[in-house]
Image (tube, helix red, strand yellow):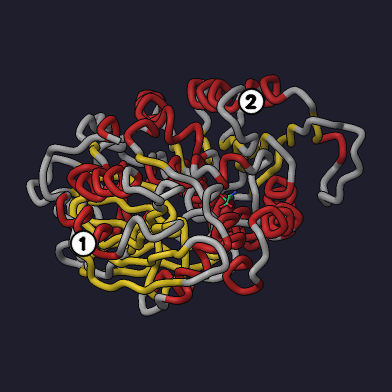
Amino acid sequence: MNTRPLKVAVLGCGVVGTKVVRLLHDRRSALADRMGAPVEIAGVAVRDLQRPRDLGIDPALLTNDPLELVKRDGIDIVVELLGGIEPARSLMVTAMERGASVVSANKAVVAEHGPVLHEIAARHGVDLLYEASVAAAIPLLRPLRDSLGGDDVTRVVGIVNGTTNYVLDRMTETGSGLDAALREAIERGYAEADPTADVEGTDAAAKAVILGSLAFHSWMSPTDVYREGITGVTAEDVADARACDCVVKLVAVLERTAAQDEFLVRVQPMMVPRTHPLAEVKGADNAVLIEAASAGRLLFRGAGAGGAPTAGAIVGDVVTAARRRLLGQHEPAVRTTVADRARAAGGLRGRYHLRVRVDGSATSLDDIVSALRRNEVRVGSVRRRRTAGPDTWVLVTEPCREADLLSAVDSLSALPSVGDVPRFLRILDSDGQEVVDGQGSTADR
Ligand code: HSE
């Protein structure tokens, strides 16, 4: 065993940071065996030095100056758990420039600045690892980079936000509203400091960028992602999903076109048939289905949020970075071709669940079906829900282009007595939604 300890600095000591420090401290003997050198916690940067903490380490190791900690001599690995873009990004850069490897759970920074950060890591011969940034405990990024490094990934479909999955699951199981379920998710420590990033899909979009960039070997940008959060999902959507044997889930869909030169990256609430493996994902769990030319279909599933699962993934990256460091190695640079070919919406094909409310007799089912037909949208099934107020027609389309569906929704809105804009939700089909042409772009919407 190497006798020089590997010095680890931890930036941020919230729910996850506390668990990371405890794991590094409590498992120090086992970790030393696995890494080949003892690990030494060189310092922990906290916001509030006065706050009582149960970390098991000498309180003198706490500091409220993360930059000073990162700049200390001899730091081998910096674990960045601050969240947000700044000062996290600058501290990561400083750490790498000073020769430390960086382990981070910060999906926002990696999604936004991944190519530059990788370039800095390569230039300074250090590692930049962020397994915990996507789906917490589930090993996904290393399988994509290493195990599937020789394969051709064509499609990734997943639930990558624990908070929204928990919220939608609660809405499905108990009929509760979004706000009550979100409060529970926050109490359980799944949500981001500002849960807007969860419910509006920004968190999932950042994870989709990281997954897509590694799966397709080409860096995307958060602006490449077509994003819809769950704020518009209602108890009626959830009930409609149940009526057609589906559940509503926030799903990230990443696809490479047959020509392999375009990507489709979307995060959106979808109706997922109960027979689909993603439908069974409960609570704050995540699951990601990867399809690759040689490997076929692979399902990764497990805890996608929470202190312990995230901390476990971070400590796993610390072990990897430590081992490489002891061998004088570092991970080969991630290819940083910047993708400018991500498309969305118009060229997409799929089935849609559509709800049309009609108040009065001026519009019949025939009128609705004709309006859809005029826009090349065919109806697969239809049912009528009579209520005290307006009648509601619930339709499921045959596979159609999303651009056509959007035009059809405009046509339906123009019919007499159709009060609200018809609500539609995409249905996740087991064989996916395919990009059929290059006409669509997010701007078309
Ligand atoms: N807020 C995130 C989620 C935490 O709910 O998935 C894990 O990234």
* Frontmost residue, 370 versus 32: 370
Circle nearer the N terminus (1, 2): 2
Residue 298 versus residue 148 in the image, above or below? below
* Frontmost residue, 50 versus 248: 248
Residue 419 versus residue 441 in the image, above or below? below
Where residue 237 appears, as percent x and y from the top left, is 49, 62
* Frontmost residue, 151 versus 285: 285
Q: Is residue 379 left or right of residue 184?
A: left
Nearer the camera: disc 1 or disc 2: 1
Residue 258 versus residue 138 in the image, above or below? above
**Residue 413, quarter of picture:** top left
Q: Residue at x 19, y 38 (%)?
A: 440
Return the mark for residue 235. none
Where residue 86 appears, as percent x and y from the top left, is 59, 23
Q: Is residue 74 left or right of residue 417?
A: right
User: Mark 1 falls on what kind of element?
Assistant: strand
- The residue to which callout 2 is attached is 70
Quadrant including the N terminus? bottom right
- The residue to which callout 1 is attached is 292
Where residue 60 appears, as percent x and y from the top left, is 86, 34
Kind of residue sitting beneath label 1: Ala
User: Mark 2 falls on what kind of element?
Assistant: helix
